Protein backbone atom coordinates (compact mmCIF):
# COMPACT_ATOMS: atom_id res chain seq x y z
CA UNK A 1 0.00 0.00 0.00
CA UNK A 2 2.84 2.40 0.84
CA UNK A 3 4.43 1.77 -2.57
CA UNK A 4 1.09 2.43 -4.27
CA UNK A 5 0.63 5.72 -2.42
CA UNK A 6 4.17 6.82 -3.29
CA UNK A 7 3.72 6.03 -7.00
CA UNK A 8 0.31 7.65 -7.04
CA UNK A 9 1.86 10.81 -5.62
CA UNK A 10 4.34 10.73 -8.50
CA UNK A 11 1.40 11.00 -10.88
CA UNK A 12 -0.45 13.68 -8.92
CA UNK A 13 2.38 16.05 -8.03
CA UNK A 14 3.27 17.02 -11.65
CA UNK A 15 -0.40 17.78 -12.31
CA UNK A 16 -0.71 19.92 -9.19
CA UNK A 17 2.58 21.68 -10.00
CA UNK A 18 1.38 22.70 -13.46
CA UNK A 19 -1.90 24.00 -12.02
CA UNK A 20 -0.04 25.92 -9.31
CA UNK A 21 2.22 27.58 -11.87
CA UNK A 22 -0.81 28.63 -13.90
CA UNK A 23 -2.47 29.93 -10.74
CA UNK A 24 0.59 32.04 -9.84
CA UNK A 25 0.94 33.25 -13.41
CA UNK A 26 -2.64 34.53 -13.30
CA UNK A 27 -2.03 36.38 -10.03
CA UNK A 28 1.02 38.27 -11.31
CA UNK A 29 0.56 38.60 -15.08
CA UNK A 30 -3.20 38.25 -15.87
CA UNK A 31 -2.73 36.33 -19.17
CA UNK A 32 -5.23 36.21 -22.02
CA UNK A 33 -6.90 32.87 -21.32
CA UNK A 34 -8.94 33.04 -24.52
CA UNK A 35 -5.73 33.13 -26.54
CA UNK A 36 -4.37 30.14 -24.62
CA UNK A 37 -7.59 28.25 -25.32
CA UNK A 38 -7.41 29.03 -29.04
CA UNK A 39 -3.81 27.80 -29.23
CA UNK A 40 -4.85 24.59 -27.47
CA UNK A 41 -7.87 23.99 -29.71
CA UNK A 42 -6.57 25.08 -33.10
CA UNK A 43 -2.86 24.22 -32.96
CA UNK A 44 -1.91 21.75 -30.24
CA UNK A 45 -4.96 19.46 -30.29
CA UNK A 46 -5.01 18.84 -34.10
CA UNK A 47 -1.31 17.95 -34.01
CA UNK A 48 -1.92 15.57 -31.12
CA UNK A 49 -4.82 13.88 -32.92
CA UNK A 50 -2.94 13.27 -36.17
CA UNK A 51 0.22 12.19 -34.36
CA UNK A 52 -1.61 9.73 -32.08
CA UNK A 53 -3.73 8.15 -34.80
CA UNK A 54 -0.99 7.91 -37.43
CA UNK A 55 1.34 6.04 -35.05
CA UNK A 56 -1.32 3.92 -33.34
CA UNK A 57 -0.91 0.14 -33.24
CA UNK A 58 -4.49 -0.76 -32.36
CA UNK A 59 -6.12 -4.17 -32.60
CA UNK A 60 -9.34 -4.04 -34.59
CA UNK A 61 -11.49 -5.97 -32.10
CA UNK A 62 -10.24 -3.95 -29.13
CA UNK A 63 -10.92 -0.74 -31.01
CA UNK A 64 -14.45 -1.94 -31.77
CA UNK A 65 -15.17 -2.73 -28.12
CA UNK A 66 -13.80 0.60 -26.96
CA UNK A 67 -15.68 2.56 -29.64
CA UNK A 68 -18.95 0.83 -28.68
CA UNK A 69 -18.35 1.46 -24.98
CA UNK A 70 -17.51 5.13 -25.63
CA UNK A 71 -20.61 5.79 -27.71
CA UNK A 72 -23.06 4.03 -25.38
CA UNK A 73 -21.56 5.42 -22.18
CA UNK A 74 -21.54 8.92 -23.70
CA UNK A 75 -25.22 8.63 -24.61
CA UNK A 76 -26.07 7.50 -21.06
CA UNK A 77 -24.07 10.34 -19.49
CA UNK A 78 -25.56 12.96 -21.80
CA UNK A 79 -29.10 11.76 -21.07
CA UNK A 80 -28.45 11.71 -17.31
CA UNK A 81 -26.95 15.21 -17.35
CA UNK A 82 -29.82 16.57 -19.41
CA UNK A 83 -32.34 15.06 -17.01
CA UNK A 84 -30.51 16.44 -13.96
CA UNK A 85 -30.24 19.90 -15.49
CA UNK A 86 -33.97 20.01 -16.14
CA UNK A 87 -34.84 18.52 -12.75
CA UNK A 88 -32.85 21.18 -10.88
CA UNK A 89 -33.83 23.94 -13.35
CA UNK A 90 -30.33 25.04 -14.30
CA UNK A 91 -29.95 27.88 -16.77
CA UNK A 92 -28.57 27.08 -20.26
CA UNK A 93 -24.87 27.94 -19.60
CA UNK A 94 -24.81 25.82 -16.44
CA UNK A 95 -26.52 22.91 -18.21
CA UNK A 96 -23.89 22.97 -20.98
CA UNK A 97 -21.12 23.16 -18.40
CA UNK A 98 -22.52 20.14 -16.54
CA UNK A 99 -22.96 18.24 -19.81
CA UNK A 100 -19.26 18.69 -20.56
CA UNK A 101 -17.98 17.73 -17.11
CA UNK A 102 -20.34 14.74 -16.92
CA UNK A 103 -19.60 13.32 -20.37
CA UNK A 104 -15.86 13.89 -20.60
CA UNK A 105 -13.25 12.50 -18.19
CA UNK A 106 -9.60 13.45 -17.76
CA UNK A 107 -8.54 10.21 -19.43
CA UNK A 108 -5.29 11.43 -21.01
CA UNK A 109 -2.77 13.38 -18.95
CA UNK A 110 -4.10 12.03 -15.63
CA UNK A 111 -5.71 8.76 -16.70
CA UNK A 112 -2.86 7.18 -18.67
CA UNK A 113 -0.18 7.41 -15.95
CA UNK A 114 -2.69 6.04 -13.45
CA UNK A 115 -3.50 3.07 -15.71
CA UNK A 116 0.17 2.27 -16.12
CA UNK A 117 0.50 2.25 -12.35
CA UNK A 118 -2.63 0.22 -11.65
CA UNK A 119 -2.74 -2.24 -14.57
CA UNK A 120 0.73 -2.27 -16.14
CA UNK A 121 1.64 -2.14 -19.83
CA UNK A 122 -1.43 -4.10 -20.93
CA UNK A 123 -3.82 -1.70 -19.28
CA UNK A 124 -1.87 1.27 -20.56
CA UNK A 125 -2.19 0.04 -24.17
CA UNK A 126 -5.98 -0.26 -23.82
CA UNK A 127 -6.06 3.20 -22.24
CA UNK A 128 -4.21 4.75 -25.18
CA UNK A 129 -6.85 3.31 -27.53
CA UNK A 130 -9.61 4.84 -25.42
CA UNK A 131 -7.85 8.21 -25.34
CA UNK A 132 -7.83 8.35 -29.15
CA UNK A 133 -11.60 7.82 -29.36
CA UNK A 134 -12.04 10.31 -26.51
CA UNK A 135 -9.99 12.99 -28.29
CA UNK A 136 -12.15 12.66 -31.40
CA UNK A 137 -15.37 12.80 -29.39
CA UNK A 138 -14.43 15.76 -27.19
CA UNK A 139 -13.42 17.76 -30.24
CA UNK A 140 -16.69 17.10 -32.05
CA UNK A 141 -19.54 16.54 -29.58
CA UNK A 142 -17.73 18.51 -26.89
CA UNK A 143 -17.29 21.51 -29.13
CA UNK A 144 -20.92 21.30 -30.22
CA UNK A 145 -22.12 21.34 -26.59
CA UNK A 146 -19.82 24.23 -25.71
CA UNK A 147 -20.92 26.37 -28.65
CA UNK A 148 -24.57 25.71 -27.82
CA UNK A 149 -24.04 28.02 -24.83
CA UNK A 150 -23.92 30.98 -27.20
CA UNK A 151 -25.13 29.65 -30.59
CA UNK A 152 -28.23 27.93 -31.95
CA UNK A 153 -27.99 24.26 -32.96
CA UNK A 154 -27.24 25.20 -36.57
CA UNK A 155 -24.75 27.86 -35.51
CA UNK A 156 -23.03 25.39 -33.21
CA UNK A 157 -22.60 22.89 -36.04
CA UNK A 158 -21.16 25.62 -38.26
CA UNK A 159 -18.66 26.52 -35.54
CA UNK A 160 -17.56 22.88 -35.34
CA UNK A 161 -17.18 22.74 -39.13
CA UNK A 162 -14.93 25.82 -39.09
CA UNK A 163 -12.32 24.30 -36.79
CA UNK A 164 -9.37 22.12 -37.85
CA UNK A 165 -10.04 19.57 -35.11
CA UNK A 166 -12.62 17.50 -36.94
CA UNK A 167 -10.52 17.47 -40.11
CA UNK A 168 -7.48 16.41 -38.10
CA UNK A 169 -9.54 13.51 -36.73
CA UNK A 170 -10.60 12.52 -40.26
CA UNK A 171 -7.05 12.74 -41.57
CA UNK A 172 -5.67 10.77 -38.62
CA UNK A 173 -8.34 8.08 -39.03
CA UNK A 174 -7.51 7.69 -42.74
CA UNK A 175 -3.81 7.37 -41.92
CA UNK A 176 -4.61 4.75 -39.29
CA UNK A 177 -7.07 2.69 -41.35
CA UNK A 178 -4.87 2.54 -44.45
CA UNK A 179 -1.61 2.36 -42.46
CA UNK A 180 -0.13 5.32 -44.31
CA UNK A 181 3.13 6.37 -42.65
CA UNK A 182 4.01 10.03 -42.31
CA UNK A 183 7.52 11.21 -43.23
CA UNK A 184 9.69 11.07 -40.12
CA UNK A 185 10.32 14.79 -40.04
CA UNK A 186 6.60 15.61 -40.31
CA UNK A 187 5.61 13.01 -37.73
CA UNK A 188 8.22 14.24 -35.26
CA UNK A 189 7.12 17.84 -35.78
CA UNK A 190 3.47 17.00 -35.11
CA UNK A 191 4.41 15.01 -32.03
CA UNK A 192 6.59 17.85 -30.73
CA UNK A 193 3.70 20.32 -30.93
CA UNK A 194 1.01 17.86 -29.81
CA UNK A 195 2.94 16.82 -26.72
CA UNK A 196 2.61 20.40 -25.42
CA UNK A 197 -1.18 20.04 -25.19
CA UNK A 198 -1.44 18.48 -21.68
CA UNK A 199 0.92 21.05 -20.15
CA UNK A 200 -0.91 24.02 -21.69
CA UNK A 201 -4.38 22.86 -20.60
CA UNK A 202 -3.11 22.21 -17.07
CA UNK A 203 -1.65 25.72 -16.95
CA UNK A 204 -4.96 27.05 -18.27
CA UNK A 205 -6.80 25.26 -15.48
CA UNK A 206 -4.53 26.93 -12.91
CA UNK A 207 -5.08 30.33 -14.55
CA UNK A 208 -8.86 29.87 -14.51
CA UNK A 209 -8.81 28.76 -10.87
CA UNK A 210 -6.93 31.97 -10.09
CA UNK A 211 -9.78 33.94 -11.68
CA UNK A 212 -12.57 31.94 -10.07
CA UNK A 213 -14.84 33.56 -7.50
CA UNK A 214 -14.84 30.73 -4.96
CA UNK A 215 -17.73 32.19 -3.00
CA UNK A 216 -19.92 31.85 -6.07
CA UNK A 217 -18.53 28.35 -6.61
CA UNK A 218 -20.30 27.00 -3.53
CA UNK A 219 -23.72 26.71 -5.11
CA UNK A 220 -26.28 24.08 -6.03
CA UNK A 221 -24.91 23.62 -9.56
CA UNK A 222 -21.47 22.78 -8.14
CA UNK A 223 -22.68 19.93 -5.96
CA UNK A 224 -25.02 18.46 -8.55
CA UNK A 225 -22.35 18.43 -11.27
CA UNK A 226 -19.83 17.02 -8.76
CA UNK A 227 -22.21 14.20 -7.88
CA UNK A 228 -22.83 13.44 -11.54
CA UNK A 229 -19.11 12.98 -12.21
CA UNK A 230 -18.05 10.99 -9.11
CA UNK A 231 -21.20 8.93 -8.46
CA UNK A 232 -23.50 8.72 -11.49
CA UNK A 233 -20.80 8.35 -14.18
CA UNK A 234 -19.11 5.31 -12.56
CA UNK A 235 -22.54 3.64 -12.21
CA UNK A 236 -23.35 4.32 -15.88
CA UNK A 237 -19.92 3.02 -16.92
CA UNK A 238 -20.51 -0.19 -14.96
CA UNK A 239 -23.93 -0.55 -16.61
CA UNK A 240 -22.41 -0.09 -20.08
CA UNK A 241 -19.76 -2.73 -19.40
CA UNK A 242 -22.46 -5.16 -18.32
CA UNK A 243 -24.60 -4.43 -21.39
CA UNK A 244 -21.65 -5.08 -23.71
CA UNK A 245 -20.56 -8.20 -21.83
CA UNK A 246 -16.99 -6.97 -21.33
CA UNK A 247 -14.75 -8.76 -18.84
CA UNK A 248 -11.23 -8.85 -17.46
CA UNK A 249 -8.57 -6.22 -18.02
CA UNK A 250 -10.43 -4.47 -20.84
CA UNK A 251 -13.50 -3.93 -18.64
CA UNK A 252 -11.43 -2.78 -15.65
CA UNK A 253 -9.48 -0.23 -17.68
CA UNK A 254 -12.54 1.23 -19.38
CA UNK A 255 -14.38 1.49 -16.06
CA UNK A 256 -11.54 3.27 -14.25
CA UNK A 257 -10.63 5.53 -17.16
CA UNK A 258 -14.21 6.69 -17.71
CA UNK A 259 -14.54 7.38 -13.96
CA UNK A 260 -11.61 9.82 -13.88
CA UNK A 261 -12.17 13.45 -12.75
CA UNK A 262 -13.82 15.97 -15.07
CA UNK A 263 -11.83 16.70 -18.22
CA UNK A 264 -9.70 19.82 -18.40
CA UNK A 265 -10.67 20.01 -22.08
CA UNK A 266 -14.10 21.16 -20.90
CA UNK A 267 -12.54 24.29 -19.45
CA UNK A 268 -10.71 24.99 -22.72
CA UNK A 269 -14.00 24.79 -24.63
CA UNK A 270 -15.85 27.00 -22.14
CA UNK A 271 -13.03 29.54 -22.23
CA UNK A 272 -13.20 29.74 -26.01
CA UNK A 273 -16.95 29.69 -26.61
CA UNK A 274 -18.42 31.08 -23.40
CA UNK A 275 -20.60 29.53 -20.75
CA UNK A 276 -20.39 28.82 -17.04
CA UNK A 277 -16.58 28.77 -16.78
CA UNK A 278 -16.59 28.99 -12.99
CA UNK A 279 -18.74 25.87 -12.67
CA UNK A 280 -16.39 23.93 -14.96
CA UNK A 281 -13.21 25.14 -13.22
CA UNK A 282 -14.52 24.37 -9.74
CA UNK A 283 -15.86 20.99 -10.82
CA UNK A 284 -12.53 20.01 -12.41
CA UNK A 285 -10.68 21.08 -9.26
CA UNK A 286 -13.07 19.38 -6.81
CA UNK A 287 -13.33 16.10 -8.73
CA UNK A 288 -9.54 15.97 -9.16
CA UNK A 289 -9.02 16.38 -5.42
CA UNK A 290 -11.74 13.83 -4.65
CA UNK A 291 -10.19 11.35 -7.08
CA UNK A 292 -7.28 10.82 -4.71
CA UNK A 293 -9.81 9.14 -2.40
CA UNK A 294 -12.32 7.44 -4.71
CA UNK A 295 -10.11 6.14 -7.53
CA UNK A 296 -8.23 3.60 -5.38
CA UNK A 297 -11.62 2.22 -4.32
CA UNK A 298 -12.81 1.95 -7.94
CA UNK A 299 -9.56 0.28 -8.99
CA UNK A 300 -10.01 -2.31 -6.24
CA UNK A 301 -13.64 -2.86 -7.20
CA UNK A 302 -12.81 -3.25 -10.90
CA UNK A 303 -10.46 -6.14 -10.16
CA UNK A 304 -13.59 -8.30 -9.87
CA UNK A 305 -14.66 -7.56 -13.44
Image (cartoon, rainbow, N blue to C red):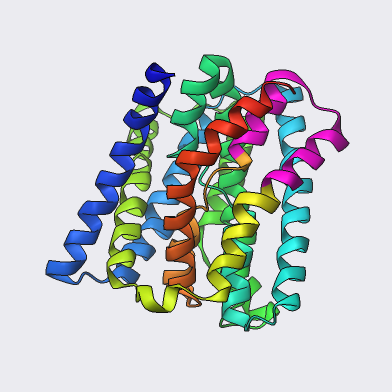
Quadrant of the snapshot with the C terminus? top right
Q: Which residue is drawn at 24% across and 60% down?
A: 23
Residue 106, placed above or below residue 218? above
Q: In front: 287, or 82?
A: 287
Tell me where residue 113 sits by quadrant. top left
On the question of residue 235 being in view, the answer is yes
Looking at the image, which residue is at 58% across and 54% down?
138
Q: Magenta stretch containing residue 117, yes or no? A: no
Quarter containing the N terminus: top left
Q: Which x, y percent locates residue 43?
A: 38, 54
Judged by its main secondary structure, the magenta piece is helix
Q: Looking at this view, is 241 or 305 the one in front?
A: 305
Instruction: Indicate the position of residue 175 as horizontal and vertical percent values.
Output: 58, 34
| Residue 125 in the image: above or below residue 93 | above
Q: Give the range drawn in magenta.
A: 234-257
Q: Which residue appears at 38% of the width and 50% of the height?
A: 44
Q: Looking at the image, which is closer to me, 146 or 185?
A: 146
What residue is at 34 percent from the left and 51 percent from the top? 202
Q: Measured from the top left, where is residue 257 in percent x and y?
A: 59, 37
Side of 264 where 76 appears, left or right: right
User: Is 248 one of the magenta-colored residues?
Assistant: yes
Provide residue 275's location: percent of width, then percent of height. Answer: 51, 77
Residue 161 found in image quarter: bottom right
Front in this rendered view, residue 281 or 186: 281
Q: Is residue 182 visible?
A: no
Amino acid sequence: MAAYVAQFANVSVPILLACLLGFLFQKYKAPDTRQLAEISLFVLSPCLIVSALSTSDLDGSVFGHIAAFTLIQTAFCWAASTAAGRLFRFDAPSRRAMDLTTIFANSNNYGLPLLLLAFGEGGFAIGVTNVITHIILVNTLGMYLATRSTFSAGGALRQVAKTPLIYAAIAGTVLFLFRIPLPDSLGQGLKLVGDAYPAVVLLLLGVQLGKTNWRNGWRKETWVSFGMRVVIVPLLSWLTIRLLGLHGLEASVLFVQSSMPAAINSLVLMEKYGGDKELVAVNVAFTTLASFLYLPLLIHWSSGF
